[in-house]
């Protein structure tokens, strides 16, 4: 008797999850870019303050292939240089460095580039990135495929795609990231 009562709510949760799955999958597919075995969703960039010479762009990438694949940024018409960077602790200090050879994704692996983590770094910006604009960049894979991706620009300090500035912790994180980008 008791067992049956406990099972019921759980079943409801499973049914709800099943009902939502096609909806979520449909949303993710809407902004897709395909490049080789890599699927890209939710590209976005952050607006830069006046006078900034560097900017950052982000996305989510999934390797749907059966081999490890790598993702790099080849170039952007908006900057002199575009590279993929990682953040890493070095003697207790958070530093960023280029990912040599591109970001490696194992079969089935998904990686989200985001503030404080992996990011595309644009050096030598020709003009500030303005909220509402689109940043264009050419991304390439380790096997030589390439795709032009438009990154919609969100507000300065935005914590994620399609959001405005002012999420918890963004004020603290931002100056640090900008400082590291100046090195
Ligand atoms: Cu960087």
Image (cartoon, helix red, strand yellow):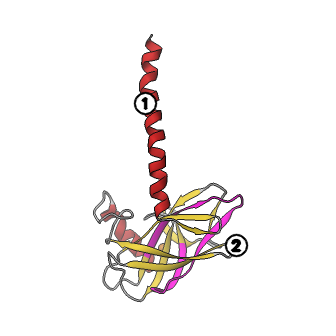
Between 42 and 142, the one nearer to me in the picture: 42
On whether residue 163 falls in the magenta region, the answer is no
Residue topped by disc 2? 143
- Boundaries of the magenta span: 56-84
Front-lying residue, 37 or 97? 37
Element class at badge 2: loop
Sequence-earlier tag: 2 or 1: 1
Residue 84: image location, x then y, percent = 55, 73
Say whether residue 90 is visible.
no
**Which SS class for mark 1?**
helix
Residue at 40% in and 78% down: 134
The residue that label 1 is drawn on is 12
Considering the image in quadrants, where does the N terminus appear? top left
Residue at image location 33% in from the left, 68% down from the top: 157
Which is the main secondary structure of the residues drawn in magenta?
Answer: strand
Q: Does the stretch in magenta take in 76?
A: yes
Horizontal and vertical percent position of residue 159: 36, 62
Query: What is the x, y in percent for residue 81?
Result: 52, 84
Q: CA distance from mark 2 to mark 1?
A: 45 Å
Foreground disc of the pair 2, 1: 1
Q: Residues within 10 Å of mark 2 (few under 14, many from 20)?
A: few
């Amino acid at each position: 008797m008791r067992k049956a009562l406990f099972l019921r709510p759980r079943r409801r949760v499973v049914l709800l999850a099943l009902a939502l799955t096609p909806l979520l999958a449909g949303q993710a597919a809407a902004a897709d870019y395909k490049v080789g075995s890599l699927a890209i969703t939710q590209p976005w960039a952050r607006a830069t303050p006046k006078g900034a010479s560097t900017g950052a762009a982000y996305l989510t990438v999934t390797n749907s292939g059966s081999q490890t694949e790598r993702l790099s940024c080849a170039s952007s018409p908006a900057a002199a240089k575009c590279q993929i960077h990682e953040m890493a602790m070095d003697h207790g200090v958070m530093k960023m460095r280029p990912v040599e050879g591109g970001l490696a994704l194992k079969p089935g692996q998904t990686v989200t580039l985001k503030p404080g983590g992996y990011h595309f770094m644009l050096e030598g910006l020709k003009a500030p990135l303005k909220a509402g604009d689109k940043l264009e960049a050419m991304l390439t894979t380790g096997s030589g495929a390439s795709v032009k991706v438009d990154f919609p620009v969100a507000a300065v300090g935005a914590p994620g795609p399609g959001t405005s500035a002012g999420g918890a912790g963004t004020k603290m994180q931002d100056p640090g990231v900008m400082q590291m980008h100046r090195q």
